[in-house]
Every structure is written in C-alpha cells, then in structure tokens.
Image (cartoon, grey):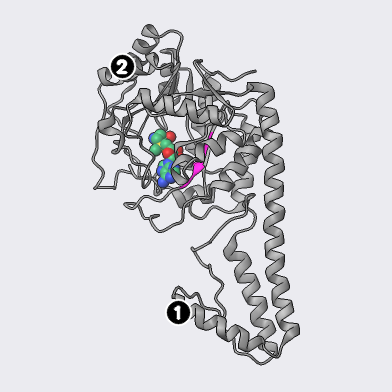
Amino acid sequence: MIDPGHGGYDEGGRSSDGRIVENVYNLMISNKIKTLLEKEGVNAPIKHLYNSAAIADLEKKYDEVFADREELRREVEDLKNQLARNKKLNEEIAEYLKNEAVKKRKAVYGNTVFIRGLIEISNICKNDCLYCGIRCSNKTCDRYRLTKDEILSCCDEGYSLGFRTFVMQGGEDLHFTDELLIEIISEIKQKYPDCAVTLSLGERSYESYKKLYDAGADRYLLRHETADEEHYNKLHPEKMSYKTRMECLKNLKEIGFQTGCGFMVGSPYQTTENIAKDLKFIEEFSPEMCGIGPFIPHNATEFKDFPSGDVDLTCFLLSVIRLIKPTILLPATTALGTAEQGGREKGILCGANVIMPNLSPHSVRKKYELYNNKLISGNESAQEIENLKNSMKNIGYEIVTDRGDIKR
Ligand code: SAM
C-alpha cells in the first residue's frame, strides 16, 4: 500500500512560489511507484493513512518489499530526492525575489512603514460570501454597528497615537447610507484635515462612490478577490457577480480614488493559474494599493474544512507585487499575522510597506471575525502601537506619522 501523505482537498504544503503543491507531486510520485511495483508483480493500492500504527507497519513492509529489489528502491529514492531538490530550488528563487523586492521598496520608501488606523464600523452585511465569517447567513455572528460618535472617538484616539489615515471598513450594511457616510467623512476631514480617509465598504453605485469622494474620502479598498470569473463564482453566491466587482473597481479609479484591489492567497479552489491572472490584473489595473493575505477558514462557513493559505506563498507574492509595481502601497495584513506569529514582520521583510492596526473599540473587535482566531491584541491601542514600533525597529524598519500616500 502506498500512502501519498496528502490528496484531494488535503493539499499539504506549497512551495514558496506556489507552483508545487504537495498533494499533486505526492500523488504523481505515488502513481509512478505504483506502476514500478506493479511491473514487479507487487500489488500496491494508493491509500491515505492517518493512523500512525498503520504507517509504522507500512514502513516495515517497505523494507520487505525492497529487500531484493535494489534497482527499484533506487528509482523510488531518486523520485523522493527530486522532490526535495525542487523544494530547495523554489526556496532559492523566493529568496532572490525577496532581496530584489526589498531593494525596490527601499529605493521608493526607504525603511519607513506607514500605518492605517482600521475602524471596523459594522459587521452587518447583506452579502453571503462563502469564505467570510460575517456573511449574512452566519446566525452565530453577534452583530453590531458603531455610531458616528463612536467612529469619531476612534479617530480622536488614533490621531493622538500618530495615525494620519483612518480606514472605515465594514460589511455591506444598508444603515450606512450616503448621507450618513458623508456626514462622518466630512466631520473627520474637518477635524483632521491632515488625515486621509479610506473606505472599505464593498460594492456601491457609481453615484454613491462619487458622493463619498466629493465629501472628502481619499482612498477605497475593494479586493477583486480573484481575477478569474469561474473562480469568483465558486467563492460567491449567485447574486454576486464578477462583472459588478470589476465595474466597481473601474468606477472607483475613474472617480479619482486611490484604489486598492487584492485577493486571498490559498482561497478554496484557487489554482496557480488563478494567481497568475491576479498578478496580470494587478499589473494592468495598476492600483495604488493591494491587499493580499492568506485565506483562513471560519468555522461557521461552508469553507470551514479548507486549509489556510500558505504564509510563505503570501510573502513570495508580496515580493512579486512589489517588483511589478515598485511604488504600490502594500500592507502586511492582519490575516498574515494571524496565520503565523511574526507574519506581518515577515511580510514587511518581503516588500510590504503598510500595517493596519486596529482602532475599533475593544468591545467589538472579537465580533468582526472574518476568520478563525483573528489576531486581536488585548492591549490598549497605545501599548499596541508601541509594541508594533518596537517589532518594526527590531527588523530594521520605522513606523512614521504620515498620511502615507503613494509616491508618484
Ligand atoms: N465588505 C467589504 C468588502 O467586501 O470589500 C469590506 C469587508 S470584507 C470582510 C474585507 C476582506 O476580508 C475581503 O475582501 C476578503 O478578502 C477578506 N476576508 C473575508 N473572509 C476571509 C477569510 N476567511 N480569510 C481571509 N480573508 C478574508
């Protein structure tokens, strides 16, 4: 019996460039071994074993099977070594791209890191994105929305801590009408004219985006999620459409927003070809910002059993995006910090130049749960920003008090 170790949805590890997925290679090698064994008259079914006793038993049999088949053993060992060599080669490529990306980011932004104060204004959402913990069909989600005064006091606290960009992010909550948002944006801009306001509130009409822009909003983040329509349809309910998403992004750019797109790395059904399309889209759309982070399952979604996206692949893609667009504003996301301790630092070291600490009231942070175990610090914001400053300093970077616009 041959155990490939990974198979089906259990894809195992990925090489840092994302091209080698463990289950594909393992199955390929397993099939080759099976053919070789069968030629020798050995019956070798492929099965995935989870039980350690069964695996130990198999290893004994491995010795038995190969005892008088030296040539066959060598061929099998060769295949295993080939896999190890490919892995090493991919690591070397990732290291090279990382160094080139850092050179580019340093030429444009030096060692500065921009911070954005993230205010999660509502977890109420009319959409039902299959991957998202705040999707409308999640009945276990404890819903909230912030009032205008609560949002403004997050800005007050943020300003005193050195934030010069506030990001209002939320589900598609119909309570936040154009009128209400215009009021909030105007008040922030009036009080803090030296600050940028970024919105991340999903899909709205051209007219709505235009009104928000005219009220003073500077930037808008709307991840494209995937640049492949078929893949988009696997991640979203029928009601949502790839064309609308792309249309929104085009409108935002046309209106004059500094626009951000982005995608999840390792989202369910994502292929290497999909990622290539994402990179091509980024190159052609030429956004000012791009948010990428690993997909992390949420236990109240139907994607709960899919594996998380790979941290090394995310970092590799951050380097590639930095090389495609050297001036782009590229965050090391919270998802990256959640998927691995020190993930955000890793992202900065691979070419990212933005971090988005949370300024939402502590009472709601847990409720804005897009995925399992979202990184939430129990510290006060002042302490949190102090810790971040230190962790950036430790890796040779410096958090600055700056609006952090894109360098043209
Ligand atoms: N409603 C707005 C929108 O759709 O753009 C903003 C909020 S939405 C929750 C922000 C982003 O979170 C999405 O664009 C998506 O890429 C990311 N996200 C949602 N669920 C996730 C998950 N399970 N793992 C990682 N990222 C996730």
Q: CA distance from mark 1 to mark 2?
A: 60 Å
User: Which label was assigned to residue 152?
Assistant: 2
Quarter of the picture containing the N terminus is bottom right
Which of 216/241 is in front?
216
Relative to residue 374, is residue 113 drawn left or right? right
Pick out the residue farthest to the bottom.
Answer: 41
Quarter of the picture containing the C terminus is top right
Residue range of the region highlighted in magenta in the rendering:
291-295
Q: Residue at x 60, y 89 (%)?
A: 43
Amino acid type indicated by mark 2: Leu
Q: Residue at x 53, y 26 (%)?
A: 259
Estimate how packed mark 2 is, as few (under 14), some (14 to 19) or many (20 or more) residues with alpha carbons within 10 Å.
some
Amino acid type indicated by mark 1: Ala
Q: Residue under circle 1?
A: 53
Give residue 227's position: percent from left, percent from top. 56, 43
N-term-proximal mark, 1 vs 2: 1
Q: Residue at x 29, y 47 (%)?
A: 137
Q: Is residue 225 visible?
A: no
Examine the structure image and report whether residue 354 is included in the region drawn in magenta.
no
Give residue 128's position: percent from left, percent from top. 35, 45
Specify the quadrant of the image occupied by residue 149: top left
